[in-house]
């Protein structure tokens, strides 16, 4: 038999469904009674109250107690609910009602935003039937230190039209086509692509060479198609092709029919994105833009380019800070390090920090006395590392001087002149 107080509270709640305090009180009494199913019903009552009043402290406490089962049989009632308990107890002496069967599915829907899961799997989700990982980007361009020129170019060529539909309509600005980022390796092109996805509030699909190429005839083309189909299903989505020069190599330079078919399929999918699909944004990165098939560079495809150069001084300072912030350091002068590391890529700076940490670790192991990473460790490591961008800049110089330039490399040419490499 159900307690008379609980039966009275049920009738009181039925007659005054808008009284959230009575519902909290009924939930508290159910927990105190400790009968089978009482905790589940208390969760449902608390969820209903929180839908009306998300900040109600008694309802939040009831939800917490019900989920954890931490309420003792003699736990006191809330101050707001106690007077209603006495009134409800004297309300009626009718026979107790049979409690309704609890709907677990409805309760889960009510509280899914209130109760955090015990364990969270942070690995990217894999679409059923697909070998591609798709993720939600949590970074934006604000997380990219320095590189103001790159951000301005990205905003003008890509982000501003997407984020301002009214202005886009006014100026008849087309969204057709994709964006190609090029520059020396290790300078953050993939990181910037993820930041763009974060700016757009879109999912991020990273497609590499290994995800596409397959020795079986026709499989590579099918993989390209599946990547685009996944991006369309998950729209808004940024689909990012890394090393596009290998995937979309000049067909005149290859005798491999499979690679030719892959380029043709990529062209077909890009045209489909341009003409039919909404919410699919295509980005690509390459270290060798001069090896990309010219057909991929035509209007409506990868017709916009952004040069991502070695990080500027502000960016280098941010990169040093990022790679040293979780290591035991002392006396580190970030601005001095940023000035002394001109020409290094982000990957170079990460390696410098790794070498400095290694120096301190070996010294600590040798002497038996733990010591922190000092400024000397980092500057000595800087002296051991040569810029990995030098060979790329030399290749770029040859292209600018002796290659056919349709204006694509104007920005690169200006940089090489400024760096006195022309």
Image (cartoon, rainbow, N blue to C red):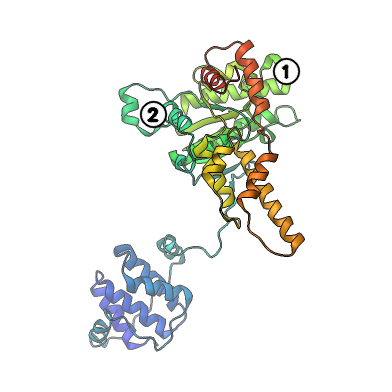
The answer to whether one can see residue 234 in this image is: no
The answer to whether one can see residue 395 in this image is: yes
Q: Which residue is mark 2?
A: 161
User: Marks 1 and 2, Cα distance to the nearest angstrom?
Assistant: 37 Å
Q: Nearer the viewer, residue 37 or 181?
A: 181
Residue appearing at x 43%, y 78% in the figure: 38
Q: Are marks 1 and 2 in contact (CB under 8 Å)?
A: no
Mark 2 is surrounded, within 10 Å at the Cα level, by few (under 14), some (14 to 19) or many (20 or more) other residues, namely: some
Q: Position of residue 174 (x, y in %)?
A: 41, 22
Quarter residue 39 falls in: bottom left
Q: Which mark is residue 254?
A: 1
Residue appearing at x 68%, y 63% in the figure: 370
Residue 357 is left or right of residue 280, and the answer is: right
Q: Position of residue 416 (x, y in %)?
A: 57, 21
The quarter of the rendered structure image containing the C terminus is top right
Residue 3 is left or right of residue 86, and the answer is: right
* Disc 1 element: loop
């Amino acid at each position: 038999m159900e307690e008379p107080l609980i039966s009275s509270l049920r009738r009181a709640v039925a007659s005054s469904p808008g009284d959230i305090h009575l519902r909290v009180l009924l939930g508290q009494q159910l927990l105190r009674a400790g009968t089978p199913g009482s905790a589940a019903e208390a969760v449902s009552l608390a969820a209903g109250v929180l839908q009306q009043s998300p900040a109600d402290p008694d309802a939040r406490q009831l939800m917490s107690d019900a989920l954890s089962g931490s309420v003792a049989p003699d736990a006191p009632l809330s101050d707001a609910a106690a007077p209603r308990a006495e009134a409800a107890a004297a309300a009626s002496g009718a026979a107790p009602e049979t409690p309704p069967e609890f709907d677990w599915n409805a309760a889960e829907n009510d509280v899914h935003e209130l109760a955090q899961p015990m364990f969270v799997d942070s690995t990217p989700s894999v679409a059923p039937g697909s070998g591609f990982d798709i993720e939600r980007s949590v970074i934006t361009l604000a997380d990219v230190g320095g590189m103001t020129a790159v951000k301005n170019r990205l905003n003008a060529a890509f982000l501003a039209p997407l984020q301002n539909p009214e202005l886009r309509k006014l100026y008849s600005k087309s969204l057709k086509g994709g964006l190609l980022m090029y520059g020396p390796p290790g300078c953050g092109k993939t990181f910037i692509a993820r930041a763009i996805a974060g700016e757009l509030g879109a999912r991020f699909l990273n497609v590499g060479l290994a995800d596409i190429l397959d020795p079986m005839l026709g499989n590579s083309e099918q993989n390209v198609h599946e990547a685009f189909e996944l991006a369309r299903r998950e729209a808004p989505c940024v689909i990012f092709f890394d090393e596009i020069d290998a995937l979309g190599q000049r067909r005149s330079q290859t005798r491999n029919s499979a690679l030719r078919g892959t380029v043709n399929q990529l062209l077909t999918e890009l045209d489909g994105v341009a003409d039919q699909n909404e919410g699919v944004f295509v980005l690509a990165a390459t270290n060798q833009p001069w090896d990309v098939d010219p057909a991929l560079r035509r209007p409506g495809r990868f017709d916009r380019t952004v040069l991502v150069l070695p990080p500027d001084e502000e960016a280098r300072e941010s990169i040093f800070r990022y790679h040293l912030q979780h290591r035991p350091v002392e006396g580190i002068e970030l601005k001095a390090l940023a000035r002394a590391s001109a020409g290094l890529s982000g990957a170079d700076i990460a390696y410098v920090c790794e070498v400095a940490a290694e120096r301190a670790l070996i010294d600590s192991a040798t002497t038996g006395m733990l010591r922190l990473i000092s400024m000397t460790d980092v500057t000595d490591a800087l002296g051991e590392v040569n810029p990995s961008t030098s060979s790329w800049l030399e290749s770029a110089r040859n292209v600018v001087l002796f290659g056919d330039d349709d204006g694509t490399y104007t920005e690169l040419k200006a940089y090489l002149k400024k760096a006195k490499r022309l």
